[in-house]
Image: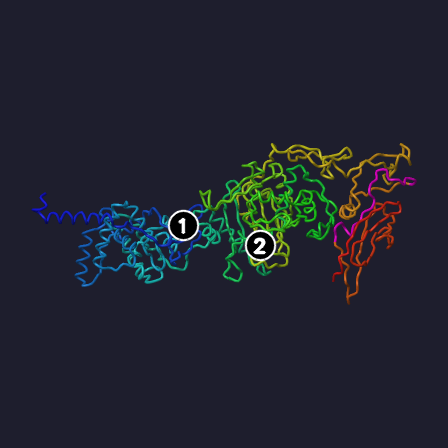
C-alpha cells in the first residue's frame, strides 16, 4: 500500500490498531467487594454465616452453577447466552425498537455477559457511552473466560433483593438449601430476581414475584426443559418469605474462623450438622433448670479420636438475653479446670514405675508450706487405693502424689502435652496445680484426653491434632500429645476412670448389656465457678463445661451434678464404641497384695496377679503386712521370750501406721487392730509405732477460735494409740498439760508462737512435733 497516495487507508489502519489496543487493554472483569464468612458442615450444609463488611449477604464466589438455575437464568435473561460473543445484535435491535416505540427506556438488550460487566462497574452512569464500554468489555470477557465461568461469576455477584447478593446466599436465605438442592420452582424464583431486585423479592410485591416465576416456568415447559407434571407441581409450591433466615449453628466456631484468618472465606468444617443441632437441643433441655439456679452458660464439643476432627462445637448455649453473655466462646476461654488433670498425674506415675494401680496412698490431713488441701467431703480415710483417687476425685491423696512426683516434672509434662495456658513457672502454681490452681480451655483439655485415648490404643504415640477445617492441616490444627504416659499406663488410667459413679439413671448402666463403657472425669473449680465433665471412648471424646461466663459462682455448680448429665446425654447421640483392647505390648503381670495393692511381700498371704506398665518398678514391696506371733486365740501378741513355741502361732497381719489406722478403721469394720501384748510380754520386738498425733498435723497453721463476746476459745488436739487402754501424757514446751486414756483429746489455748508438743505413753514411747500457733480466728 502506498501510504502517500492513500492517506485514508493509513488512518483506517491506525484507527484499527488503536481500537485493537484499546480493546486488548480493557481491564478484565474484577470484583473487589467484601464477602461474607461462611461456615459449612462436613457434608456441605450451611451452619452459619456473617454479613460482609459492607453489610451484604454475599458468599464467596462459586466456580459452578447448578443446572436448574443455569437453565432458568439463561432462559429468563439471555436465551442465546451459549451462542453470542458477549453482545447479541438481535437483542440490541429489539430493545432499541421497544424503547423508540415506548418513547422511554423499557429494555436494555443486555446479555448476561454485559450485565456481568455492569455489575463489576457499579456506580457508573447508564449512558450511551457507558453502554459502548460495556459492549466492548463484554466481548473482551468472552475472549478471556469460558461460558460456564462467566455464568458462575454472574450468579455469584448478581443482586437478589434487599442485602442479598449471589446465588448461594439467596438459596440459603430464601429457601434454606444449597443451590444444588433447589427445585425447579425455587430456581425459577431466584432467576427472576436480578432483573428488578429493588422492586420484587421475597417479602415485597409477592404476587408479582409469583407471576414472573410462573411465566418463566411456562417458558421452560414450552421449550422442553421440564415436563407437564413437573410444571404443575412447581406451580403449587409456595413462594418464599423472609421469616426463616439463615441457620445459626456453631456461631462461635464461625467467630473462631474469622479470628484465625478465614474472614471472607467459605470454610468447609469438620462439624456434623445433625449432631451439632442435637447437642444444642440437649443443651437447651438442661439449660432450663440450670437457669433457675442462676447458671446461665454451657459449652460442649465432640472430638473424633481417630482423626482429631471436631464433630461438634457449641461455644455457648443459645439465649436471646444478652446479659447472659451468650456470645462468649467458652470453649476457647481459660478457666480453672478443677480435678481434670488428676488422671494425667496417675498415668505419669504408672509409666515411671512409681505407683501400682491399686497401691494405697495416704489420705490424712496435711499441710505443705501453708497449703492444706481438703477432700470435697471434708473427711479422710487414712489410706485409699490409687485408682480410686481419680475415680472418686480425692484431693488430699492427689496432692500427696504430686508432692512425691515433683511439681516441676508435672508442670513440664503438661506443657509438652499441649496445654499452652499454663505459661507461668511451676513455682507460681505450686501443689495447687493438681486441684485447678491454673487455667486451661475446654479445647486444650479435650485435646489431651483425646491424646490419652489414642495412646491407650497405641496410635501415633498418643499424638493428635485437633482441627475444625476439613482437609486442612494448618490454621485450625493444634497438636496435643500424651507426653510421658505409655500405652499401658494410659489404658489403666482409662480403666480406673470407668469406675466413677454415674449421676442419676446412668448410675445403673452396668445392669444393661447395651450400655456403653465410658472413661469419664469431672471437675469443679474453687468457689463453684466452673463445672466440667470429659468422657472418652475409643472413638470419641466429649467435653462439657457448665457455669457463668462472667465467673460468678453458684451453689451446687458441681461437675457430677451439672456437667456430667449433659455429657452422658451427648454420648447417647453417638454410635457406641467397642472398649479399648489391653495394649499387651506395654503391660506385664505382677503378683500384688490384694489388700495393699503393692507388690506382694513374703508376709502377704492373699495375693492377686494383675497387669502393670512394662517398666522398671520403683516401689517397695508391701510395707503393711507383718509377720506377728499371737496366741492360738489371736487375742494377744506374744514374743519368743514370754511364751513357748507351742503357745505361739505366726500369722500375717495388715498393720497401718497409727494415724492412718485411726481414720481407716472408722470406715472399714473388717479392719483388725493389732492385738495388745499378752501378760508378761511388755516389749515391742518389731518396734512398731504405737502412737500417732492426729491433730495438729504436720505443717498446720493453728488458729485459736474466738467465741461469743470475744472470749478466747480452745483448740482440740487429738492422738491415737493402738492399745485402747493406754495412757498418753501431753507436754507443751516441757509443761505438762494433761493425760488421756481411751479417747485421746485435750483442749488447749496457747498464745501465738512456735511450740514443741511431746506425747509419752505409759510404756515410755515418745512422739514429738513442732506446732505453730498462728493467732486467733473468729
Q: Disc 2 and disc 1: Cα gap in Å?
A: 32 Å
Is the magenta region chiefly helix, strand or loop?
A: loop
Is 686 one of the magenta-colored residues?
yes
Mark 2–mark 1 CB contact (< 8 Å): no
- What segment is highlighted magenta in the picture? 679-700
Residue at the image position 40 percent from the left and 54 percent from the top: 36
The answer to whether any part of residue 226 appears in the image is no
Comparing 489 with 650, the one in front is: 489
Residue at the extreme right:
680
Is 459 one of the magenta-colored residues?
no
Q: Residue 379: image x %, image y %?
A: 73, 51
Q: Residues within 10 Å of mark 1 (few under 14, many from 20)?
A: some
The numbered mark at residue 546 is 2
Residue at the extreme left:
5
Quarter placement of the N terminus: top left
Q: Is 189 displayed left or right of 630 in the figure?
A: left
SS type, badge 2: strand
Q: Residue 85: image x %, image y %?
A: 22, 47
Q: Residue 175: image x %, image y %?
A: 38, 54
Residue at the image position 42 percent from the left and 55 percent from the top: 50
Residue at the image position 82 percent from the left and 57 percent from the top: 748
Q: Residue 361: image x %, image y %?
A: 71, 43
Residue at the image position 87 percent from the left and 47 percent from the top: 761
SS type, badge 1: loop
Q: Which residue is mark 1?
A: 265
Quarter placement of the C terminus: bottom right
Amino acid at each position: 500500500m502506498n501510504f502517500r497516495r492513500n492517506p485514508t487507508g493509513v488512518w483506517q489502519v491506525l484507527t484499527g490498531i488503536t481500537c485493537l489496543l484499546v480493546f486488548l487493554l480493557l481491564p478484565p472483569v474484577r470484583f473487589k467487594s467484601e464477602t461474607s464468612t461462611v461456615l459449612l458442615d462436613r457434608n456441605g450444609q450451611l451452619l452459619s454465616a456473617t454479613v460482609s463488611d459492607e453489610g451484604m449477604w454475599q458468599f464467596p464466589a462459586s466456580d459452578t452453577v447448578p443446572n436448574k438455575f443455569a437453565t432458568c437464568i439463561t432462559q429468563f435473561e439471555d436465551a442465546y447466552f451459549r451462542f453470542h460473543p458477549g453482545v447479541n445484535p438481535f437483542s440490541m435491535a429489539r430493545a432499541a425498537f421497544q424503547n423508540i416505540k415506548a418513547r422511554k427506556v423499557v429494555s436494555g438488550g443486555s446479555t448476561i455477559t454485559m450485565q456481568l460487566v455492569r455489575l463489576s462497574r457499579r456506580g457508573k452512569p447508564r449512558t450511551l457511552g457507558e453502554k459502548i464500554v460495556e459492549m466492548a468489555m463484554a466481548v473482551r470477557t468472552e475472549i478471556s473466560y469460558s461460558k460456564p465461568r462467566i455464568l458462575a461469576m454472574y450468579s455469584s455477584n448478581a443482586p437478589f433483593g434487599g442485602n442479598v447478593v449471589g446465588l448461594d446466599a439467596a438459596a440459603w436465605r430464601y429457601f434454606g438449601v444449597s443451590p444444588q438442592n433447589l427445585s425447579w420452582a425455587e430456581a425459577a424464583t431466584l432467576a427472576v430476581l436480578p432483573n428488578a431486585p429493588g422492586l420484587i423479592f421475597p417479602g415485597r410485591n409477592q404476587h408479582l414475584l409469583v407471576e414472573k416465576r410462573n411465566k418463566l416456568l411456562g417458558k421452560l415447559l414450552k421449550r422442553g426443559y421440564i415436563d407437564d407434571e413437573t410444571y404443575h407441581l412447581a406451580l403449587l409450591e409456595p413462594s418464599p418469605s423472609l421469616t426463616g433466615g439463615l441457620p445459626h449453628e456453631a456461631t462461635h466456631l464461625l467467630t473462631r474462623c474469622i479470628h484465625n484468618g478465614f474472614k471472607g472465606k467459605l470454610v468447609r468444617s469438620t462439624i456434623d450438622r445433625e449432631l451439632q443441632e442435637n447437642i444444642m437441643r440437649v443443651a437447651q433441655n438442661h439449660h432450663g433448670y440450670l437457669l433457675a439456679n442462676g447458671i446461665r452458660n454451657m459449652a460442649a464439643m465432640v472430638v473424633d479420636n481417630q482423626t482429631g476432627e471436631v464433630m461438634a462445637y457449641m461455644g455457648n448455649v443459645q439465649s436471646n438475653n444478652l446479659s447472659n453473655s451468650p456470645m462468649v466462646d467458652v470453649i476457647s476461654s481459660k478457666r480453672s479446670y478443677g480435678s481434670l488433670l488428676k488422671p494425667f498425674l496417675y498415668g505419669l506415675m504408672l509409666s515411671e514405675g512409681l505407683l501400682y494401680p491399686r497401691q494405697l496412698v495416704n489420705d490424712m490431713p496435711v499441710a505443705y508450706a501453708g497449703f492444706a488441701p481438703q477432700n470435697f467431703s471434708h473427711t479422710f480415710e487414712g489410706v485409699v487405693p490409687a485408682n480410686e483417687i481419680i475415680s472418686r476425685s480425692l484431693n488430699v491423696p492427689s496432692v500427696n502424689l504430686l508432692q512425691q512426683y515433683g511439681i516441676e516434672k508435672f508442670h513440664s509434662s503438661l506443657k509438652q502435652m499441649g496445654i499452652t495456658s499454663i505459661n507461668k513457672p511451676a513455682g507460681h502454681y505450686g501443689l495447687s496445680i493438681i486441684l485447678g490452681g491454673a487455667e486451661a480451655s475446654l479445647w486444650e483439655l479435650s485435646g489431651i484426653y483425646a491424646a490419652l485415648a489414642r495412646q491407650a490404643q497405641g496410635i501415633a504415640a498418643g499424638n493428635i491434632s485437633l482441627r475444625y477445617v476439613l482437609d486442612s492441616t494448618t490454621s485450625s490444627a493444634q497438636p496435643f500429645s500424651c507426653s510421658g504416659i505409655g500405652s499401658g499406663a494410659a489404658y489403666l488410667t482409662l480403666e480406673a476412670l470407668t469406675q466413677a459413679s454415674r449421676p442419676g439413671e446412668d448410675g445403673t448402666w452396668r445392669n444393661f448389656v447395651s450400655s456403653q463403657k465410658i472413661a469419664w472425669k469431672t471437675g469443679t473449680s474453687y468457689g463453684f465457678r466452673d463445672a466440667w465433665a470429659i468422657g472418652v471412648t475409643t472413638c470419641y471424646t466429649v467435653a462439657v463445661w457448665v457455669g457463668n461466663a462472667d465467673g460468678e459462682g453458684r451453689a451446687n455448680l458441681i461437675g457430677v451434678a451439672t456437667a456430667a448429665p449433659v455429657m452422658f446425654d451427648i454420648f447417647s447421640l453417638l454410635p457406641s464404641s467397642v472398649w479399648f483392647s489391653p495394649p499387651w505390648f506395654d503391660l506385664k503381670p505382677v503378683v500384688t497384695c490384694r489388700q495393699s495393692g503393692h507388690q506382694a511381700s513374703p508376709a502377704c498371704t492373699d495375693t492377686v496377679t494383675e497387669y502393670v506398665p512394662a517398666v522398671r518398678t520403683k516401689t517397695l514391696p508391701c510395707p503393711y503386712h507383718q509377720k506377728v506371733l499371737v496366741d492360738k486365740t489371736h487375742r494377744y501378741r506374744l514374743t519368743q521370750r514370754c511364751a513357748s513355741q507351742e503357745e505361739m502361732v505366726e500369722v500375717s497381719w495388715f498393720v497401718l501406721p497409727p494415724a492412718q489406722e485411726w481414720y481407716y478403721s472408722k470406715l472399714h469394720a473388717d479392719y483388725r487392730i493389732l492385738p495388745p501384748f499378752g501378760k508378761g510380754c511388755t516389749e515391742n520386738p518389731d518396734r512398731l509405732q504405737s502412737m500417732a498425733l492426729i491433730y495438729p498435723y504436720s505443717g498446720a497453721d493453728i488458729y485459736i477460735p474466738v467465741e461469743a463476746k470475744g472470749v478466747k476459745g480452745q483448740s482440740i488436739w487429738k492422738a491415737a494409740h493402738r492399745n485402747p487402754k493406754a495412757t498418753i501424757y501431753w507436754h507443751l514446751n516441757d509443761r505438762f498439760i494433761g493425760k488421756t486414756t481411751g479417747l485421746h483429746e485435750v483442749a488447749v489455748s496457747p498464745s501465738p508462737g512456735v511450740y514443741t508438743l511431746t506425747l509419752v505413753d505409759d510404756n515410755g514411747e515418745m512422739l514429738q512435733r513442732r506446732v505453730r500457733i498462728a493467732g486467733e480466728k473468729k
